[in-house]
Image (tube, helix red, strand yellow):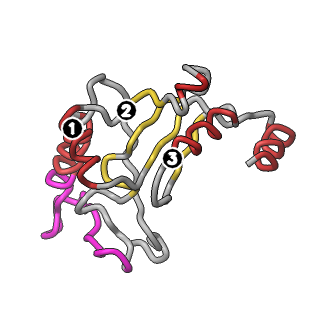
Amino acid sequence: MYLGHAFLLKEFGVRPKIGWHVDPFGHSAANAALFSDFGFEAIFISRLDEGERQKRMDEKSMTFLWNPFSNNFGEEKQILGHIMYADYSSPKGFQWDQNNNNDGPVQNDTTLADFNADQRVTSLINHVQQVSLAHKAKHNVMIPFGDDFTFQNAR
């Protein structure tokens, strides 16, 4: 992490402030403390126990302030945590890779029999609204399009 951040600072003059823990199987206070030490202000988390995810959706606590080791450090290592709605998978109906459901493309030509743009747009809007319901505050949400081994041959 140190070498990567040093490279980004030297080559591009930027220091990352947001991390994405894409596919770990567990999140510890040590991870949050280290990310805070790396200078991150926020972290996105993908994998989570489904019971915990559902509880957080019900409580609208998908975004939270994480104070790792607060008994020792107080708020010194505080970091904003954000749990992804459905890991890092594409919304249902929008998985276009041949290796992952191969949902049909959005067809916006009204002269063709398989025109579906209106239905697909409505489906995506409904998904975004559902994701936003899992949060207390009105803010931007990230909707990932992908999954394991996807977009190797997307239509």
Camera-side mark, 2 or 1: 2
Tell whether 77 sits left or right of 121. Answer: right
Outermost residue, top side: 75
The spot of residue 4 in percent (x, y) is: 77, 49
Outermost residue, front side: 71
* Mark 3 secondary-structure assignment: loop
Q: Which residue appears at 68% of the width and 34% of the height?
A: 37
Q: Which residue appears at 17% of the width and 63% of the height?
A: 115
Tell whether 17 sits left or right of 24. Answer: right
Q: Amino acid at mark 3?
A: Ser
Q: CA distance from mark 2 to mark 1?
A: 16 Å
Which of the 4 image quadrants contains residue 109?
A: bottom left
Q: Amino acid at mark 2?
A: Thr
Q: Which residue appears at 60% of the width and 27% of the height?
A: 77
Q: Which residue is mark 2?
A: 63
Viewer-nearest residue: 45 or 88: 45
Q: Which residue is mark 1?
A: 129
Asked if 62 appears above or below 149 in the picture, the reply is above
Tell me, yes or no, whether the highlighted magenta stretch contains residue 129: no
The spot of residue 26 in percent (x, y) is: 46, 55
Please give the range of residues in magenta: 99-120
Viewer-nearest residue: 91 or 84: 84
Q: Which residue is mark 3?
A: 28
Q: Which residue appears at 29% of the width and 66% of the height?
A: 105
The spot of residue 8 in percent (x, y) is: 78, 43
Q: CA distance from mark 3 to mark 2?
A: 16 Å
Which mark is drawn over residue 116? none
Asked if 98 appears above or below 39 in the picture, the reply is below
* Mark 2 secondary-structure assignment: strand
